[in-house]
Amino acid sequence: MMVETLPARWYVDQGIFERERRAIFARSWMLLGPEHEVAEPGSWRAQRLNGWPIVVVRDEGGRLRAFHNVCRHRGAELVEADGAGKCRLLVCPYHAWSYDLDGRLVRTPNFGEEEAFDKSQHGLLPARVEAWAGLIFVCLDMAAPDLTTWLGSIPELLKPFPLAPDMEYHSSFSLDGACNWKAYCDNTVEGYHLPTVHKRLTAAVDRDNTSIKSFDGGRLVVFDVTYQSTGSDLRGAKGIWFYRFPGFQGVAGDRSFKADRIEPVGAGGMRYTNWSWFRDLSEPERLDSMEWSRQIAAEDIGICETVQRNMVAGVYLTGVLSPTQEGHIARLQQLVREAVDG
């Protein structure tokens, strides 16, 4: 039976976006970034994840902790929204309310009548934080499964490959796209577009020895890739590309590991962030690999932006999905419906 796509309004309606943000992203583990950024006690890293301001710290005992980057006094940001540093206290730059690295409120200078004010009831608002393979993840839902459960089949599938702790960190980059996050992820879980959109990638992949499979009820889509030519030069002969619904993806090979975050920034906007690690590659090869990753993401964003413009124009209302090429899109869109419609 032919499957129809989600209606176009699901890609342009701000109300649907807000429901997705709370029903999908708030209940999922979100990639914050590399664990080495908060390796030392007292170190912190702040990001805005899917619209939520988050700060992760390493407390004096070496434990990772995560909080909303929001002072409980008047709501100011405690630290720079996309910053990093080291401290003994988190001190609000507005009125100097200060918090221990475990989130406890310890100082309220010149607040007045402090004997009637219970500091223990005004600590920082916590979030969950866990690390896997040198990556830090944050979750806002205290009832969601732990990170290992959420990752599902990913650790087992990636066992044959070196991951971030086995390689040297290189750099990261971000690209903003004028398209709905689902348009980008629809594109992400199918290989139908590769020959027309990604010329270099198509030349590097042995399509006769590459497969696409889903795991974990369709929440994980995996490309098992065999490379040829420049693909094998930079990544090795074999590799795994994976997408974990809703916004975590990565590429693992013998010579590189890449972790990506896909996040919505509005009904008509998304952001792609990449972090890359390498081994056994020269610096020019590493730079080429980074540029290749940027090119692939830019090509995907570019074609999805044309889709978004036509969604907004109001002529395209719905489409049909190929039963042989786009089954993973059908499942992705079903997951979105189930989460939003409840």
Image (spheres, rainbow, N blue to C red):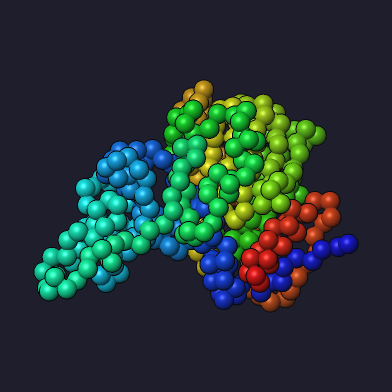
**Front residue of 134 and 279:** 134
Find residue 88 and report its horizontal and vertical position in percent: 21, 48
Instruction: Find the residue positioned furthest to the top.
Output: 280
Q: What residue sits 53% from the left and 47% below the top?
A: 147
Residue pictured at 22% horizontal, 52% vertical: 89
- 312 over 225 or under it: above or below: below
**Residue 123 placement: quadrant:** bottom left
Across and down, in percent, residue 254 comes to 59, 27
Q: Is residue 96 left or right of residue 321?
A: left
Residue 97 in sight in this render: yes
User: Would residue 272 be visible to someone looking at this image?
Assistant: no
Between 159 and 15, the one lying in front of the other is 159
Query: Which residue is drawn at the image coordinates 64% and 41% (left, top)?
Result: 153
Residue 76 point in image, percent of width and height: 28, 67
> Count of labels shown?
0
Nearer to me, 27 or 184: 27
Q: Which residue, as the protein is rendered here, is positioned at the far right?
A: 1
Left or right, residue 221 beside residue 59: right
- Locate the N terminus and report the quarter of the image it occupies: bottom right
Vertical relation: 22 (above or below) 287: below
Residue 217 in percent (x, y) is at: 71, 51
Residue at point 68% right, 43% down?
222
Determine whether 7 is above or below 134 in the image: below
Residue 236 occupies quadrant: top right
Q: Split into 4 quadrants, where in the image is the C terminus?
A: bottom right
